[in-house]
Amino acid sequence: MEKSWSDIGLVDSLKDPPLREITVQGKPVALSYKDGQFGAILGVCTHVGGPLGKGKLEGDYIVCPWHYWQFHRTTGSAQPGYEDKVSQYELKIENNHLFINTVPITKGHKSVHPPHLLARDVKREEGPIRVVGISTTIMDSKNPRYSTSDKLLEVAINHAKNELGAQTMFIRLNDLKFRACEGFYSKSAFACTWPCSITQMDETDQLTQVYEALIHWADVVIVATPIRWGAASSLYHKMIERMNCVQNQITINNKVLIQNKVASFIITGGQDNVQDVAGHMLGFFSEIGFVFPPFPFIAHTRGWDAEDMENNIAYVAESDDLKNGAKDLVRRSIDMAKIVLQQHLSQEEIVKAGRKAQHLTINEEL
Ligand code: FES
């Protein structure tokens, strides 16, 4: 194809910063300057379209700002060991101006990367109702203590297994090593991927177990939390921040990962604020697709001025009312799961009113 030169600007004005994004015929280009040489490659990462011109230079490689893939700043080739490549552009200097040939001299290539296991289609396997309990209390696991929320969750899960014929799973977040959400969504809605960007980058991250249970396995989730300073536990918040990627799929792809599933909650604390904690949990779990049984939480506190925590533990440990409440909560949740599975309340697509997102096609850009 015939060359087509376009004037980018004065050479001296383009040396600093050493990496920038320019637009050439409507396409973003990552223009770099290092060791007296300019480089120009397409500014669209082959992964999920991150803006390479807004990344950073490490040696001769441009590091994508979204998930840190690297591309050679002049050839566009991915770092050694990877086959991906973005288009490379020819440059020339005339009369102290930098020109770019808008016809790429080499084309890009997106290689096929095997998808993460979590990315498989969500399909309910045949079988009895499946209930997962997620305990979010924090303690020194070598020196465990009595946790009122954890114990009531145990009662509920054991009842589901032994009396209600459900398959069950119990996850203690305290046992899992997982990273806090690092705010990929704050870079761009498209940088917040499903499966979670951290899950895909870090195979040691153990929140995979929670995603697997919530997205693929369970019909019912019961989340138990203590009240800490009037809110759910910090581990609970650490977990739900990592669920941004689940909600974001609805926003950017109209893809609802959680359908026909029921959530309910166990909330306990020495002091009060149950309704606030429950309101938050209900709001969050509704945002990612769960529905709820009638009376979707049980709770216990002894009130604002109760500081004698040892008596609180004794109260819960001996309370048949609370244990029966936990059993009845899981029964209501299972009953509701049977209804939603029979009625099939799912929706393949939900257009989120008021939330807009541009769609991005990477292959066209390469
Ligand atoms: S590393 Fe570039 S978009 Fe993910």
Image (tube, rainbow, N blue to C red):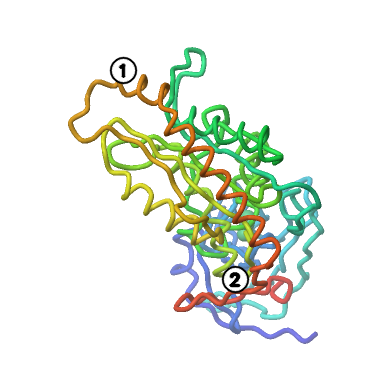
- Front position in the image: 121 or 298: 298
SS for dot 2: strand
State the image coordinates of residue 18 (x, y, percent, origin top left).
Answer: 50, 58
**Which residue position holds label 2?**
29
User: Is tag 1's residue or tag 2's residue first in the polypeptide sequence?
Assistant: 2
Whether residue 272 sits left or right of residue 246 in the image: it is: left
* Mark 2: amino acid: Val
Whether residue 352 sits left or right of residue 213 in the image: it is: left
Looking at the image, is 255 positioned above or below residue 242? below
Q: Is mark 1 within 8 Å of ligand 1?
A: no
Q: Nearer the viewer, mark 1 or mark 2?
A: 1
State the image coordinates of residue 264 (x, y, percent, origin top left).
Answer: 50, 48
State the image coordinates of residue 318 (x, y, percent, origin top left).
Answer: 41, 22
Q: Is residue 343 visible?
A: yes
- Badge 1, how many Cα within 10 Å: few under 14, some, many 20+? few
**Which residue position holds label 1?**
310
Q: Quadrant of ligand 1?
A: bottom right
Residue with the most extreme top position: 143
